[in-house]
Amino acid sequence: MDALLRELLAAPGIAGYEDRVRDLIAERLPAGVARTTDSMGNLIASLGAAAPGASDASSSSTSNGVMFVAHMDEIGFVISDVRDDGYLSLRPLGGIDPRTVYGRALRVITTTGEVMGVIGVKPPHLMTDRAREMAEVPPIAEMLVDVGARSGEEAASLGIAVLDFAVLKKDPVVLHNDLWSARALDDRVGCYILLRALERLEAHTFSRPVHFAFSVQEEIGLRGASRLARAFDLDYAFAVDSVSTADWPGVSRALSGAVVGAGAALRVLDNATVIPPAFRREIATVAEREEIPLQVVFTGGGTDAKPFQAEGPQVMSLAIPMRYTHAAVELVSGRDVEHVIRLVVALARHYAA
Ligand SMILES: [Zn+2]
């Protein structure tokens, strides 16, 4: 796991609060690449285009663009109450499993800085009915964050206010077989892939615009991508995001065909999108020519591909197989990541040559 990905993972940014992630990505974009930010906060870097975002009504359909999109936001929490006793309440933003949150450390991001907190759990020592109490996880709205403050005023004096946001503390680890694990790999690994692909494509000449979009508010309903889908004239839109695998003991393979370490994944069926087989075969031919290992998979959930499909372009999710999606230990293969970078590069060259 290299320094750029670690930086992207460390930057906190939930839906609607992506500014730190966006600033970091803008800084890491190759210097000469044109970029723009729309009013919602989507960041778009463009190659082979004049003005990014300009959809020239007089241009023929053959000059319509190609877009690759990865979302900047991660699942997290908004501070919903600063209590008189100094504890904080949380409102989750995105699909968060309370089991992955209970008893963990949090970073509270305030307007003035950052404050650490922990979500307390009643110890076995104080339980009166262990079997029952140990099996129970409260809803997130009932969990309390301890930031060390003894009163609401003391919490406020640390800079904490309602509507600040929080994310779990992130501790990236590298496992055997070049497996990487960390919170927020969904979808900072997609942002990383776009940045690396841009570096490889920067010097290339394209006959049509190729856009690399870093979208907002994916985790709460693909909202940033919906705006992008309406704003750009595209023939092709590719979401670069994770695909949840069921390749570990105790989970039925009938839930997902994706396998970590088996190559870049084309996510052709999920809860949001179905991709007709002809387009899948076309992409497979490009991957085969470049000798990129490819798996064609189905899974649950949805990606930023969905809102684009409704607006006309052919769409596909170019996916990084991921175990334990949305947990603090999301896990991907470094080799798969490289394969997806190569696939993005190959498809940009193929569809915008
Ligand atoms: Zn997600």
Image: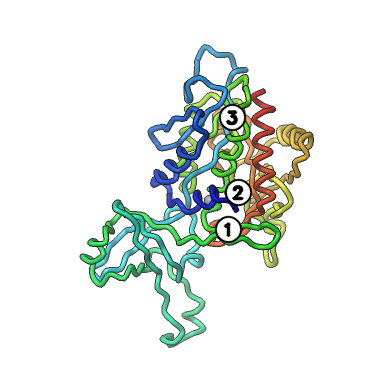
* Furthest residue in direction top, as rendered: 58
The spot of residue 323 in percent (x, y) is 63, 58
Horizontally, residue 170 falls left or right of residue 181, namely left
Question: Which amino acid type is marked by label 1?
Answer: Glu
Residue beneath disc 3: 202
How packed is label 1: few (under 14 Cα within 10 Å), some, or many (20 or more)?
Answer: many
Q: Earlier in the sequence, mark 2 or mark 3?
A: 3
How packed is label 2: few (under 14 Cα within 10 Å), some, or many (20 or more)?
Answer: many
In what quadrant of the picture does the C terminus appear?
Answer: top right
- Give the secondary structure at mark 2: strand
Tell me if residue 309 comes above or below residue 55 in the rendering: below
Residue beneath disc 2: 242
For the point 40% across and 73% down, the residue is: 120
Question: Which amino acid type is marked by label 3?
Answer: Glu
Q: Are marks 1 and 2 in contact (CB under 8 Å)?
A: yes
For the point 43% across and 49% down, the residue is: 13
Q: Nearer the viewer, residue 295 or 97?
A: 295
Q: Nearer the viewer, mark 3 or mark 1?
A: 3
Residue beneath disc 1: 330
Question: Which amino acid type is marked by label 2?
Answer: Ser
For the point 68% across and 49% down, the residue is: 336
Q: Nearer the viewer, residue 164 or 131?
A: 164
Image mark for residue 119: none
Q: Could you give the CA–CA distance between mark 1 and mark 2, rounded to whole angstroms?
A: 10 Å
Tell me if residue 119 comes above or below residue 37 in the rendering: below
Q: Could you give the CA–CA distance between mark 3 and mark 1, rounded to whole angstroms?
A: 30 Å
Q: Nearer the viewer, mark 2 or mark 3?
A: 3
Describe the colour scheme in one phrase: rainbow
Tell me if residue 289 comes above or below residue 100 in the rendering: above
Q: Earlier in the sequence, mark 3 or mark 1?
A: 3
The spot of residue 236 in percent (x, y) is 61, 29
Q: Are marks 3 and 1 in contact (CB under 8 Å)?
A: no
